[in-house]
Amino acid sequence: MIFSHRSMMSVLMLLCAAVILSGCSVKIGGGDKKVSEVIEENLELRKQVKELDEQLELRISEAKALRQQINAGKEPIPGAEPPVLSRIKLGRYSGSISDDGAVGDTQVVAYVQTEDQFGRMLPVAGVGTMQVVLIPDDGEPRMIVEKRINAKEWRESYRSNFTGTHYTLRADLPSDMPMGTFDGTLRVTLRQADTGAVFSTQLPIKIMRQPEPESIKHEADDAEAVKDQENHAAINAEASETDVSDVAETTADVEDHAADGEKGIVADEK
């Protein structure tokens, strides 16, 4: 019997489907692998190739843009103003924060916004520094945090979500900070990569440090003990007043009884 090419392809497709459904193994590269595993690996490889193609396309576009800039010279286009980094500022939620379950502030977070001359967010490359200066009620201000952010860390801190677009920087507060509430200053500095220009901004913050729960419990127990002692003293004082009153009443009764006896004696003598 002679099969046509189309019939042969149909038979092969049916056989492949049967193999996939049955989960059979095939020998590939000297080892046994299921057809489903081979298909999954193939899909993963295709995904990686697609990502590499996208990155290559971006690099080609970048090189093309740079070549056009070189060839075009420095003659500006009338009415066009290229975006230029003009300032950096800290977002409204910047400041000290507490980890989940922690008592008191444990970190400082800075939401850094880089803006052009029109106040628009402008992604930039560079390196930065994050500093926190503690301002105590008495004594000199002292730096408690100084964290340097390299170019890779700065790039990877870029965020865009419901709070806006910004660079999110975080730093841990020292664990040996004293208890209490303190005034402080959060300062961020950025050195732009392509121009070398330095930008800085700062924000006054509050840092709240509280004792551990066990310490709070001990303080509560001590306060309760003092209260119990005061109540006990009040009860004793009340009991003493009652005893004095009883003694006074008893003394009065004795005196009255003695007076009645004297009256009786006088009557008998008469």
Image: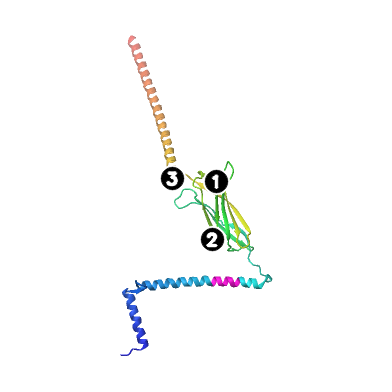
Examine the rendered structure and indicate whether residue 46 appears above or below residue 171.
Answer: below
The residue drawn where x is 48% and y is 72% is 50
Q: Which residue is mark 1?
A: 182
Task: Give the residue number, with chain letter if any, for mark 3.
Answer: 213
Amino acid at circle 3: Pro
Alpha carbon separation for disc pair 3 and 1: 20 Å
Overall secondary structure of the magenta section: helix
Task: Please give the residue where the numbered disc 2 appears in the rendered image.
Answer: 152
Q: Residue 60 colored magenta? A: yes
Label 1 and label 2: CA atoms lie apart by 33 Å
Front: mark 1 or 2: 2
- The reply to whether the magenta stretch includes residue 148 is no
198 sits to left or right of 97: right
For the residues carrying marks 2 and 3, which lies nearer the camera in this image? Answer: 2
Q: Is residue 56 visible?
A: yes
Q: CA gap, disc 2 to disc 3?
A: 39 Å
Q: Earlier in the sequence, mark 1 or mark 2?
A: 2
Question: Disc number at residue 37?
Answer: none
Q: Magenta stretch? A: 57-65
Q: Residue furthest top?
A: 269
Amino acid type of disc 1? Phe
Q: For numbered disc 3, what is the local secondary structure?
A: helix
Q: Quadrant for the C terminus, please.
A: top left
Residue at the image position 43 percent from the left and 45 percent from the top: 213
Residue drawn at 42 percent across, 72 percent down: 43
> Residue 249 occupies which quadrant of the picture?
top left
Q: Earlier in the sequence, mark 2 or mark 3?
A: 2
Quick check: 32 above or below 227?
Answer: below
Give the quarter of the figure containing the N terminus: bottom left
Question: Residue 190, percent across and down?
Answer: 59, 57
Residue type highlighted by circle 2 = Lys
